[in-house]
Image: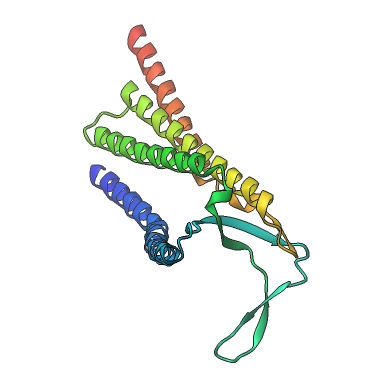
Amino acid sequence: MKKQLNIICILIFVCLGLSLIPNVYMIGDSFVQGFKHGYSQSKEASLHLEKPQILMPLELSLWPESVAIAPDTILNQKSGERFPVQHIHNIVWVDQAKSDTTTTRGLLSIIRLIAILYAIIQFYKLINAINHQVIFEWVNVKKLNKIGVALLLSYVMTMLFVGLNYLFAKSLIEIPGYHFNYWCELNTVNLILGLIALLVGRVFAMGITLREEQDLTV
């Protein structure tokens, strides 16, 4: 039984690691490319004694005004043909100086990251306790509650971050043939996992309470 539990936990951590690879890759690549671009801009600006323009990426989901009409085209370099295309998920680079939410967005990102890491640590502690035959105990209920709250907090921070992105984008950008689609950003994975963790915590608590009541009646 313990071996099966360990295998399942290893698979969970492997899947979690694989799910983080795209984000880590994008963050790393964006950092390197952004550093190169910023360095070249600052070098060019120093020659002209100008303040360099700092660009900030905004991840936006768009939706065409009519799904039957493709307002844009894309070039196929193999054939030289142009194909109709609709842009759904995009990264738009805007002037950071025009944003007054940079600090807030950075703070939300940090809180979200801390919450996710905290949930992972609590999950590891929970599995470690179960491996040591500490299962239906109040300490595990607390761990499950902490995991649930941390995941819910990360979801709230994500939605606030996305909301600020869209509010800022709406104040600066208007793309013909498209409108902003906030609903595509509603990734509810952390929300569902957080609620499941809280639910399991309540089930554990009910089981422990029943066991304690039975012990008192014996």
- Image x and y of residue 95, in percent: 56, 55
- Image x and y of residue 46, in percent: 41, 62
Q: Nearer the viewer, residue 1 or 86?
A: 86
Left or right: 55, with 64 as reference point = left
- Image x and y of residue 205, in percent: 41, 22
Q: Nearer the viewer, residue 92 or 128?
A: 92
Left or right: 215, with 201 as reference point = left
Which residue is rendered at x = 71% and y = 62% of the image? 175
Whether residue 79 is situated above or below residue 118 in the rendered picture:
below
Q: Quadrant of residue 197?
A: top left
Q: Quadrant of the C terminus?
A: top left
Q: Nearer the viewer, residue 72 or 126?
A: 72
Which residue is rendered at x = 51% and y = 39% of the image? 104
Colour treatment of the image? rainbow
Which residue is rendered at x = 45% and y = 31% of the image? 149
Q: Residue furthest bottom?
A: 79
Do we see residue 140 in this rendering?
yes
Left or right: 75, with 154 as reference point = right
Do we see residue 193 in this rendering?
no
Whether residue 136 is situated above or below residue 19 in the rendered picture:
above
- Image x and y of residue 150, in percent: 43, 34
